[in-house]
Amino acid sequence: MAITKSLLVLGSIALFGAVSASPVAPKSVRIPINRKPVTFSAEAGGSGTVEIKNFENAQYFGDIGIGTPAQPFTVIFDTGSSNLWVPASNCSKTSCLLKHKFNAGKSSTYHPNGSSFYIRYGSGPVSGFVSEDKVSFGVAAGDSSAAAFEVKQTFAEITDPSGLGGAFAIGKFDGILGLAFQTISVDDITPVFVNMVNQGLVAESLFAFFLSSEIDPPVPAIAKGELIFGATDPKHYTGELSYVPLSSETYWEVQADSLTVGSFTSTSKRAVLDSGTSLLAGPKDEVAAIAKALGAKPLVNGEYTIDCNATKTAPDFVATLGGKTYNIKAKDYIISDEGVICIFGMVGIDIPAPAGPLWILGDIFIRQYYTVFDYGNKRLGFAPMATGI
């Protein structure tokens, strides 16, 4: 049902205040995102490919391995936070029952740290303790084949994920791999991608998302999505990439020229690109005003339902970034759940200063625009998604 689906992805952006492997030849790794079984394949040049899943346009996640031999985990690759965490073997919370849990005793490369860990997401806190081990990409579930990348990494083992509520319990993921900046990393832990850059593991200091789309969930997407590290993939976008400089090296944040829906213009010019949030999110009062104008009705936790016929009449959501306009049509921000109910794809979330107020451009935006997270040049790149791949 739509209510369950929408609750899976809200508030993934981490809030302020929560808070070496031998180099090898630079390479890139592609992580296709679709609904097919996970497979591992080596490619020329030493890159690796992992197929991961799109669950009804509400969750995008992929597989990593931790330890030696690698223990498999499914994680959300989240540009709205900076830490990596997975459930600990002693997580006794009900929400951990069906999750993969890290067993330190089964890893020959594990190093204890023991420091306490606490991170607060928009939905609530997650806590546990800090550990160190090898994190590998390109490892399929239950497969300890050589990975595309192996990174010595400090991460967290979670004993209490209660702050994520039902989103974690019924979600299709075990943990979160943060891809934002070290400045918002809890305990100043170096993020996975920053370690990849520092250890010379990527040809270019960037990564990019192509998200698959289920036109009629739960019918699987036709095209594979892809998260690529160390390169961009021109077959997934049309035209040229347009870049916008970052306004903050905390989240992946840019200064917007404007954010509008019909006659409504946001007073906030701050926009964060967040792969871990499925919807568009903005200040509660602004989202409430837009929802009222479009006839949407309050649901729970800042969410709204809307008449499914509004896809034919509602105006575009328009983000103007770096002088270019990026339109999200109503049919793309009004989410139908099997024709039973429609969710208004904007949610009210108040991010406190100094991190906010701001707008979060989540998967609804990224599904329409190929997005490049250029760490080396401190910028974001956008281009329309290619279709018919």
Image (cartoon, grey):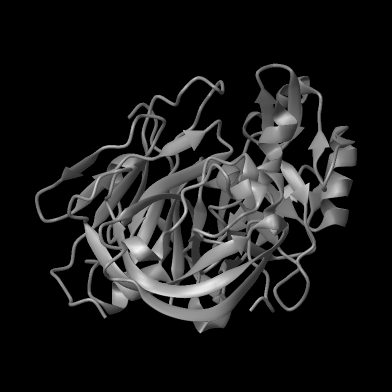
The total of numbered circles placed on residues is 0
Q: Residue furthest top?
A: 339
Q: Is residue 9 visible?
A: no
User: Which one is nearer the viewer's eye here, 163 or 277?
Assistant: 163
Q: Residue furthest left?
A: 44
Relative horizontal placement of residue 325, taking residue 291 as reference (left or right):
left
Relative horizontal placement of residue 132, taking residue 178 as reference (left or right):
left
Residue 226 at what x, y percent from top left?
36, 44
Which image quarter holds the C terminus?
top left
Identified at 9% across, 50% down, the residue is: 44
Q: Is residue 18 visible?
A: yes
Residue 372 at what x, y percent from top left?
41, 57
Residue 207 at what x, y percent from top left?
36, 59
Which of the 4 quarters of the picture holds residue 122?
A: bottom right
Identified at 63% across, 70% down, the residue is: 119
Identified at 26% across, 54% down, the residue is: 29
Which of the 4 quarters of the picture holds residue 108?
A: bottom left
User: Which one is nearer the viewer's eye here, 2 or 169?
Assistant: 169
Residue 291 at what x, y percent from top left?
84, 41
Which image quarter holds the N terminus?
top right
In this view, 7 is above or below 15 = above
In this view, 372 is above or below 98 = below
In this view, 339 is above or below 262 = above
